[in-house]
Image: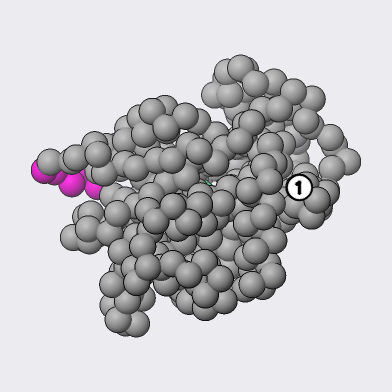
């Protein structure tokens, strides 16, 4: 796997930290818990989209674009980071925000929504669930073209084969850190949303010869739907990288037990996990992704799926700016 042949911008200096969580490990009395701090990636507020944007924005610049257009939920980390990348590159950025929960868009809301405004978004277009998002983004691109400019459309979550290279690169980074520290991990756990993180890290690990199983905690879809989404993306990444040979679809492992009533809707288990990481380790999770992924991690430890003596790496994909839009749920649920 030679990633150097793909144009890339750099938004983070060096590697993100890989840390042991001694207090949480002791508290759970199960496996050794480690965390990969991708919440500390570069661009405003950090998070996993930064790695994808390194490849996507390089492609946009290569094509001569001056405006980035993307789509996300009303409190989207991906939209915040795409906008931050545009600012850094001297580009403009337009956002299509999908109301996955009816009437959830509040222009005055805190969290990522506040940051859209602070970072100077050019335009926000709010659409309802069920809208053709590609068409909505294309309409924005046409508007930008009519102004004599050139837009580059980034798919939701930055999850196409190019963006997912960011997580193939992360797999390489993790294996290097594991080698340096003498840490043979038994499992990797991550949130699974638009799928680029899950698919990218899985393809990256296998391409580098690692057998570490990857467990994805779904934040939105049912297990069969998420397995299909991640599997399809994994095939696209492999084709894009020119990786041949057999691919076992059973590699894609997803648990959908922690979604609760739906995407972005708080659950007591999420709130408990967010409080536990904060109070045991001083680490801020988020209510929509890592809080639910951590709820999955903790429950799977309690059930003995991850066993005492094993080494489990939890991928912290970021998102803490959204905490400020969920204060009540996180403290009271
Ligand atoms: C987008 C996001 C995820 C999910 O990553 P995908 O690549 O979309 O599956 C997880 N955590 C946070 C904080 C995110 O913003």
Which region of the structure is painted magenta? 240-245
Residue 241 part of the magenta-drawn span:
yes
For residue 308, say whether it is visible: yes
Residue 88 part of the magenta-drawn span:
no
Colour scheme employed for the rendering of this structure: one colour
Drawn side of residue 236 relative to residue 73, left or right: left
The spot of residue 291 in percent (x, y) is: 61, 52
- For the point 19% across and 40% down, the residue is 248
The N terminus appears in which quarter of the rendering? bottom left
Q: Is residue 326 above or below residue 249?
A: below
- For the point 18% across and 60% down, the residue is 209
Mark 1 crowdedness (10 Å alpha carbons): few <14, some 14-19, many ≥20: few
Q: Which residue is mark 1?
A: 333
- For the point 80% across and 51% down, the residue is 332
The spot of residue 14 in percent (x, y) is: 46, 75
Q: Is residue 303 above or below residue 277?
A: above
């Amino acid at each position: 796997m030679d990633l150097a042949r793909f144009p890339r911008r750099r938004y983070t200096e060096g590697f993100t930290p890989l840390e042991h969580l001694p207090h949480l490990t002791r508290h759970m009395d199960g496996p050794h818990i480690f965390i990969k701090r991708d919440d500390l990636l570069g661009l405003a507020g950090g998070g996993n989209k930064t790695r994808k944007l390194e490849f996507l924005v390089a492609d946009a610049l290569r094509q001569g674009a001056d405006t980035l257009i993307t789509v996300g939920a009303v409190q989207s980390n991906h939209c915040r980071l795409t906008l931050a990348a545009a600012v850094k590159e001297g580009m403009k950025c337009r956002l299509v925000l999908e109301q996955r929960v009816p009437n959830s868009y509040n222009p005055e809301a805190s969290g990522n929504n506040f940051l859209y405004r602070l970072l100077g978004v050019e335009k926000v277009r709010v659409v309802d669930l069920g809208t053709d998002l590609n068409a909505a983004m294309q309409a924005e691109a046409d508007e930008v073209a009519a102004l004599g400019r050139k837009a580059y459309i980034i798919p939701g979550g930055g999850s196409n084969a190019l963006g997912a290279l960011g997580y193939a690169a992360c797999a390489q980074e993790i294996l290097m850190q594991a080698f340096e520290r003498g840490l043979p991990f038994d499992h990797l756990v991550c949130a699974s949303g638009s799928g680029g993180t899950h698919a990218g890290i899985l393809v990256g690990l296998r391409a580098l010869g690692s057998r570490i199983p990857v467990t994805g905690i779904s934040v939105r879809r049912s297990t069969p739907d998420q397995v299909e989404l991640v599997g399809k993306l994994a095939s696209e990444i492999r084709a894009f990288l020119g990786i041949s040979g057999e691919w076992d679809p059973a590699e894609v492992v997803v648990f959908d037990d922690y979604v609760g009533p739906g995407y972005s809707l708080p659950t007591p288990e999420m709130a408990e996990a967010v409080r536990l990481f904060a109070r045991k380790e001083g680490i801020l999770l988020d209510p929509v992704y890592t809080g639910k992924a951590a709820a999955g991690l903790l429950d799977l430890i309690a059930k003995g799926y991850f066993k005492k003596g094993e080494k489990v790496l939890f991928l912290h994909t970021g998102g803490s700016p959204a905490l400020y839009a969920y204060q009540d749920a996180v403290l009271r649920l």
